[in-house]
Image (cartoon, grey):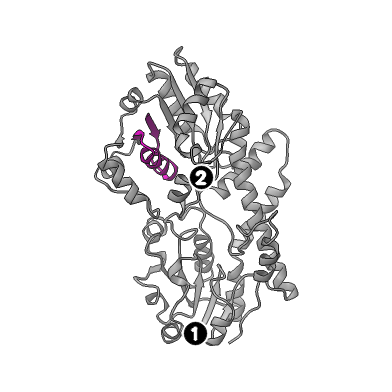
Amino acid sequence: MNITIVGTGYVGLVTGTTLAELGNSVYCVDIDEKKVEGMKNGVVPIYEPNLEEMFLRNIQSERLFFTTNLKEALDKSEVIYLALPTPPGEDGSADLSYVLQVANNIGEMMTEYKVIVNKSTVPVGTADRVSSVISSKTNIPFDVVSNPEFLREGFAVEDSMNPSRVVVGASSERAKDIMSKIYQPFTNTGIPIIFMDEKSSELTKYAANSFLAVKITFMNEIANYCEKVGADVDKVRLGMGSDDRIGHRFLFPGIGYGGSCFPKDVKALIKSGKQEDFNFQILEATENVNTTQKVILVSEIEKYFGGNIKGKKIAIWGLAFKANTDDIREASSLDNIALLLEKGAEIIAYDTVAESNVQKLIGDKIQYAKGMYDALEDADALFISTEWPEFKNPNFELMSKKMKNKAIFDGRNMYPLEVPEQNGFYYKSIGRRTILK
């Protein structure tokens, strides 16, 4: 089948590459000429494990194409995926201007039946709005369906090729049949495709992400309470997660959630609720707790240094909002950097994947190290912000030699407590006892 993907951000590029891998001819459209030219030459504009190999394979197999010409791609395709940004506005609501503008363009350009697929995360009722915009520009028949993505950054290729389910919101039997054919390679292997109405499909995405945000935040609250009463959150989460009604995933405490999805989607669902005179009280609490949780270790660093960190050199390991991505959107590292700088600390950070994105954002306000141990040279403390695999088994002996002061503030609970204790480090993590050197 011939398919167009409008937007080559994280979702669009992974979706387009996956659909090409399934044997379709895929035309990816983006307005950024430099980006499109780079992709034509095999340059993957985002970091995602295993994506580049699949990306290059489908370019070479002539199933994956890139263009800035929407009309050219539209004329070749029966199905048009909209994978456009829906950033939060000042009031938290999702900005649909990109989606609706492209819908307007499609309405003006289409010459035959198309299925328009909303892949972007959008508020309930967006399919109706897209349909209204297109129908105001043409009398040619078309269908608009909702097909939310459930990709985890860092595992997007795995999730795209082995999804737990495919959710499609569609009222038209013709559109349902086309979507069934697209996802037949999945359904043939037993992966369910769940058809529902468009509004339910749109809400499913928001509900899923918001629930996971609540789950993470609840565990962070439990972790903070553990510290008050002397319990160990690692043991608590194992006991909880063994209940198959709860499960082990998303029970790891830390310095809050970030990224492009959870913060944005929680805000958008809160705002959507208010528009219907409905208050998502649990989501409002989740958002408030997460804001505090992100910088919870800064006060611990201040306490360690007697209330004053001015002039202290803090090494930061990790800048991405999570491991295996270069995404720094809503990253806890940025909140901590801002607060530490405000309090007069000096910062040297290490993250080879996300460093360039941080440099574009904050420039030379901090220093950047070439290696994880280089960042520790004469450091007064180490702050761990991202759970990159290379940080899991560090050389503590070398760390001792490099650091001026053997103190670790771990926002991701990277080490069993006995490890820093045996190596003579002060070690403060989340929801566990503090190791005093």
Secondary structure beneath dot 1 equals: loop
Q: Does the magenta stretch include residue 13?
A: yes
Depth check, front residue: 82 or 190: 190
Q: How crowded is mark 1: few (under 14 residues within 10 Å), some or many (20 or more)?
A: some
Q: Residue at x 60, y 73 (%)?
A: 429
Label ID, residue 405: 1
- Quick one: label 2 or label 1, which is nearer the N terminus? 2
The residue depicted at 44 percent of the width and 32 percent of the height is 182
Q: Is residue 253 left or right of residue 400?
A: right
Q: Could you tell me which quadrant the C terminus lies in?
A: bottom right
Residue type indicated by callout 2: Pro
Using the image, determine if residue 112 lies above or below residue 415. above
Which range is magenta? 1-28
Image quadrant where residue 370 sits: bottom left
Is residue 59 depicted above or below 420 in this figure? Answer: above
- Whether 16 is among the magenta residues is yes
Name the residue type under label 1. Asn
In x, y percent, where is residue 323?
A: 47, 61
Most foreground residue, 249 or 346: 249
> Which secondary structure lies at badge 2?
loop
In this rendering, would 277 be left or right of 95?
A: right
Q: Is residue 100 visible?
A: no
Q: Label 2, on which residue?
A: 163
Q: Residue at x 55, y 25 (%)?
A: 129
Closest to the camera, between mark 2 and mark 1, is 2
Q: Would you say residue 411 is visible in this rendering?
A: yes
Q: Which of 194 and 400 is in front in this view?
A: 194
Give the CA separation, mark 2 to mark 1: 46 Å
